[in-house]
Image (spheres, rainbow, N blue to C red):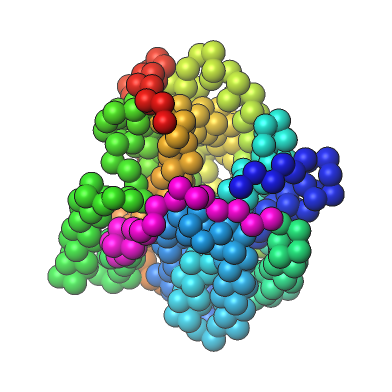
Amino acid sequence: MDTGLRTGTAAGRWVITACVLGSGMAMLDNTVVTIALPRIAEDLGAGFAGLQWTVNGYTLTLAGLILLGGSLGDRFGRRRIFVTGAVWFALASLLCGLAPSVEVLAAARALQGVGGALLTPGSLALISASFHGADRAAAIGAWSGLGGVAGALGPFVGGTLVEWSWRAVFLINLPLAAVVVAVAVRHVPESRDPDAAHRLDVPGSVLAVAGLALLTWAGTAAGSGASPGLQVWGAGVAGVAALVAFALVERRSRSPLVPPELFTGTGDAGDGRRFTGANVVTVAVYAALGLLFVLLAVQLQIVAGFSPLLAGTATLPVTVLMLLLSARAGRLATRTGPAPLVTGGLLLAAAGMLLASRIGPGAGWFTDVLPATALVGLGLSAAVAPLTTAVLDAAADRHAGVASGVNNAIARAAGLLAVAAVPAIAGIRGDAPADPASFGPGFTVAMTIGAGLLAVGAALAAALLRGRPASPVAAPPA
C-alpha cells in the first residue's frame, strides 16, 4: 500500500527513525560482539570453539531465515513482522546478557539471529512501501547514511560498554528495542504485498538452516580437537547433502525463497551468468571479511594488548572510507562497468589483509593497524558498491528485491562458514583465547588465507563481470 509519505514531514521522519533504529540495533549488536569476545572467554571460561559459536549462532539463523523473514512481512504485514522481530531480538538479548555459560550464550545468540531475520528485511521494506518517487530515494538515502553513522559509532559504543561489562553489549538492546516498538506501533503505517505467495517455502528454509548448521558444526569441531573424526566428516557430508536438497527443492517449489531463474537467466529473469558470477565473487569477499572482523578484534586484545575500546576502533577506517567513497565508486562503475573497480579494489583489500597478518605483540595503532585497515577500507570502497550494483543489474526489475535478499544471505553464509572452518585450517585450536602464543601464528595464517580469498575474488571479477549485463527480455504486458 502506498501511503504517500513525504520525507520532510513529521510522519515521514518517524518512519525513517523506526527503521534506522531497528536495522541499526541488529547491525551494531553483531559488530560490538566481536570486541567482547576476549572478555567473554575470560569470564565464562570459553575456548575458541565457544567464541566461534557466539558469533556464528547469530549469523547461522540470520543467514538461513532472512529470506523467509522478508516473505513473512510481505504476506502478514511488514510492520507486524518488524515489531515482532524487535521484541524477539530484545528478549533474546536479555537471555544473552544473563547467560551463565558460553553454551547458553551461543543458544541465545541463535535466537537473536531469528529476531534479526524478522527485523532486518522489514526495515528497508517498510521504507520502500511507505514512500514513493523522489521521497523514496531520499528516504533510502537517509536510511543508508544514518546506518553508516551508526556503524561508525559502533566501535566506540561497543568498546566503552565492554570496558564496563560484556553483558552490557546485549542489555543495551532492551531500551533500544522498546523505542523501536513504541515508534513503529504509533507512527509506522502497516503494509503488505497483495500479490505475495500464499505458501511459504518452509522446507527450503529448514534445509538451508540445517545445511549451514551442519557445516558450521563440522568446521568448528575440526578445530576443537586433534584430527577430525568420523562424526565431523559425517556432519560435513550431511551439510552438503542438505544444501543440495535445498537447491532441488527450490527448483520444484511454486514460491521458492531463491528463484532458480535468477541463476539460469530463464525467460525475463535477467542475466543469469552475470548474477551467478557476482554472487561467487561475493562469497570470496565476505568469507575474507568475516575472518578479518572477528579475528582482528581478538588478536589486538589478547596478543597486542589493546584495550577493548582501542581494539574496537581498529576497523573504524574501513567504515569511514566506505561512507566517504562508496557512492562515488558506484557512480564511476556506471561508466566503466564493475569489473575494473571490483578487481582493483579487491587486490587493494588483499594487500591490506597481508599487512594485517603482521600485527602481533607490540603492534601500534598508527604504525601497524591503520595502514592495514586503511588499505582494506580503500579497496572495499572501490569494490562493494559496484559489486552490489552488478548483482541488481543482472536481475530483472521485478526480481530486484529478492536478488538483493539472496545476495545478502549469500554474503552472511560465506562469513559464517569461513569463521567456522578457516581457524581450524590456520591452526587456531580450542585453548587459543587463553594462549597468545598459540593464537598469534594462527591469526597470521588466517589473514593470509583471507588475502588469498580476496585475490581469487579479484580474478573472478575480472573474468565474470566484464562488460555490461545482458538486457533481460521484456515481460509481456499484464
Figure quadrant of the C terminus = top left
Q: Is residue 16 above or below residue 205?
A: above
**Is-magenta flag for residue 202?**
yes
Q: Residue at x 28, y 50 (%)?
A: 254
| Residue 212 coordinates in the image, percent (x, y) | 32, 60
- The answer to whether residue 267 shows anywhere in this view is yes
Q: Quadrant of residue 369?
A: top right
Residue closest to the eye, 158 or 274: 274
Residue 148 is at least partly visible in this image: no
Q: Compared with residue 274, is residue 15 higher up or lower down, i.e. above or below?
A: below
Q: What residue occupies the far bottom of the structure in this picture?
A: 100
* Count of numbered tags: 0
Left/right of residue 377 with respect to residue 146 in the rendered view? left
* x, y percent for residue 98: 60, 83
Left or right, 241 with reference to 346: left
Along the viewing direction, whichever of 240 and 155 lies nearer the viewer: 240
Query: Quick check: 456 left or right of 327?
Result: left
Residue 456 location (% of width, % of height): 35, 33
Residue 307 is drawn in which quadrant?
bottom right
In the image, 255 versus 155, the foreground residue is 255
Position in image of residue 166 (x %, y %): 64, 73
Q: Nearer the viewer, residue 440 or 456?
A: 456
- Looking at the image, residue 125 lies above or below residue 266: below
Q: What residue appears at the point 33 percent right and 43 percent down from the top-left corner?
A: 259
Q: Residue at x 47, y 17 (%)?
A: 337
Magenta region: which residues? 189-210
- Residue drawn at (69%, 73%), measured in percent from left and top? 174
Residue 364 among those drawn in magenta: no
Outermost residue toward the front in this view: 478
